[in-house]
Image (cartoon, rainbow, N blue to C red):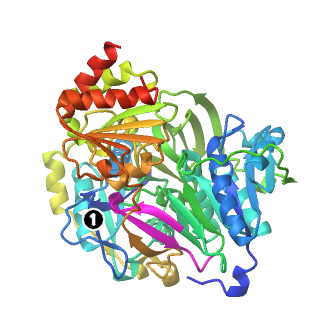
Amino acid sequence: MKIVVCIKQVPATNDAKIDPETKRIIRKGIKAILNPFDTYAVEEGVQLRDKFGGEVIVLSMGPPKAEASLREAISVGIDRAILLSDRAFGGSDTWATSYTLAKAIKKIGDVDLVICGKQAIDGDTAQVGPGIAAHLDWLQATYVMAVEEISSSSIRVKRMHEDGYDICEMSLPAVITVVKDINTPRVPSLKGRLASNKCEIPVWKPDDIGADISKIGLDGSPTRVVKTQPPPPRHTNTKKIEGSSIECAQSLLRELRLRSVI
Amino acid sequence: MIAFTDAERKEYHNIWVVAEILAGEIQPVTHELTGAARILADLRKSEVWVVVMGSGIEGKLESLFAYGADVAIVVDNPGLSGFVDETEAQIMKRLIVKYKPEVVICGATTRGRALIPRVSVMTHCGLTADCTGLSIDPENGDLLQTRPAFGGNIMATIRCSNHRPQMATVRPRVMKSPEPDPGRAGRIIKEEMLTSDTEKIKQIIDVFHSTETAYNLADAQIIISGGRGMKGPEGFNLLKQFAQRVGGAAVGASRAAVDSGWIPYAHQVGQTGQTVQTKVYIACGISGQIQHLVGMQSCDFIIAIDKNPDTPMMQIADIAVVGDLFEIIPEIIKGITNL
């Protein structure tokens, strides 16, 4: 079985700044981490490889320093890593990102299963996983909470929904996106750390994956961020309650009674 | 990427909503989105069409018209009783090519977020996730999609001028549901599911309805919510006691509290948690990052308790209580008990 896990390096803090010119995120000066939801995808890839043999590869598109997140994945048992990095990929929205990742997955060749985290914490869109499946014209299952069975030709998964869950079986190749419930990511072993320090990570450019230049980066993205602004204020006539804790509690109790809360 | 010409853009009309069906029933988010679509369609002097894909749903379409739809396109087939992403995406693509909508809006639910990205790739359209505001240019039909971005500290406006249709998802309870008008009528267009739509190599083996996966914040009338200011899991025990004393209250939390491991994710309110529209929301020690505010600011009445009077939450609250919540909340609990 050949498995590809797609990951993203994201800013660690919630207070990322915006470039006023490009309206895109400024990554400089902010600590970058492996997207927390992707750690579950990495773990699932490693577990499936351990059970069924084969190879598990981690793939990311990003700036050169995204290599650090790929090494982190190697340290917990991923076999090898590939980084898609080039100026031409910059400014990609989810359409162009999923196109680029799909082209790289085709280039890797003979892939049976692609695993993604359910979403990245910076954009929170959850669009890239299904986007990859659509570009490849493969089947998909999202919000997967358990892989119940897998063979060389099919996979059976438990999918989370708002009103419960379902069990879905589909043929391979396929793309799944996974949620927190699926496993508990391991910590790196000493052997894993050594492997992650040593490994060579090839960097692929648009030419390496045969990408149509009109479908990548900012030019290949149908969406445009046209404006960023602080959020609108809700309203301003706030009633302030101050004083001793007992006074505050009594005033608040009166307000709650007035609104039949208590 | 090849952009549409003006002439090509003008072939696209009407605002579409993809209906959310659970267990054969149209969900409230469909009505919320129909209301939002109505406003856009009126500005464009066009129509609201709702796409309904499911099994045994033909008799349930009247409510769509009451909430503002002009047309319901219905694909009713036993093969659509379970959620098969690929089949629904294939049907959507076929309908989009046939009828050319200007805008497609879908609920940002687990199903909607699986379906619509697939459709957007297949039809080569831009898609914006989790919009909190939608407006439209009445002249050229460009959809202006507003969403919180970058951890929620800023609102981004996104446009897809060069492509049609323009696609957006909106989370449940972000848009207010309009008042239904039971006298309003509309047209029904029936479409078949074709053999070429169906995905034979995917099967839904079983469906389980349960609430075990989600703590039901949405149904609560009152939410008492805690943030970083609760300082630890013990702080949340205090909020649970408070909630027990108040009939029908649920305990919510900010992302900071959930990420610190003080309370499970199911309690999280905000952009990456649940969106709520309760009668009363009591925010305890929550500073009010945008990503939290977008999940609760359409609550009817907001009370904030915090030491710091200058936090964003204290600014937007209807009542801001300035003080030590570890002293004030026990006093309130005592006060309720003595009633």
x, y percentage for residue B25? Answer: 71, 37
Specify the subunit that label 1 lies on. Answer: A
Say left or right for B319 vs B92. left
- Residue at image location 48% in from the left, 44% down from the top: A143
Residue highlighted by disc 1: A16
Front-lying residue, A182 or B29: B29
Find out whether residue B246 is within the magenta segment. Answer: no
Residue B150 magenta: yes
In the image, is A122 to the left or to the right of B124? left
Quadrant occupied by the C terminus of chain A: top left
Question: Does residue A36 appear anywhere in the picture?
Answer: yes
Q: Position of residue B19 (x, y in %)?
A: 68, 49
Q: Residue furthest top?
A: B338
Instruction: Name which quarter of the figure residue A229 lies in.
Output: bottom left
Pick the front one: B333 or A242:
A242
- Residue drawn where x is 36% and y is 51% of the image: B316
> Residue at position x 52%, y 83% from top?
A214
* Coordinates of residue B234 in the picture (x, y in percent): 21, 26
> At numbered mark 1, what does the secondary structure look like: helix, strand or loop?
loop
Type of amino acid under label 1? Ala
Quarter location, residue A239: top left
Q: Measured along the vertical axis of the image, is residue A200 above or below residue B242? A: below
On screen, residue A261 versus residue B145, left or right, reads: left
The reply to whether residue B288 is in sight is no
Q: In the picture shown, does residue A204 fall above or below A10?
A: below
Please tell me how crowded label 1 is: few (under 14), some (14-19), or many (20+) other residues with Cα within 10 Å.
many
Q: Residue at x 40, y 76 (%)?
A: A91
Q: Which residues are magenta?
A: B145-163
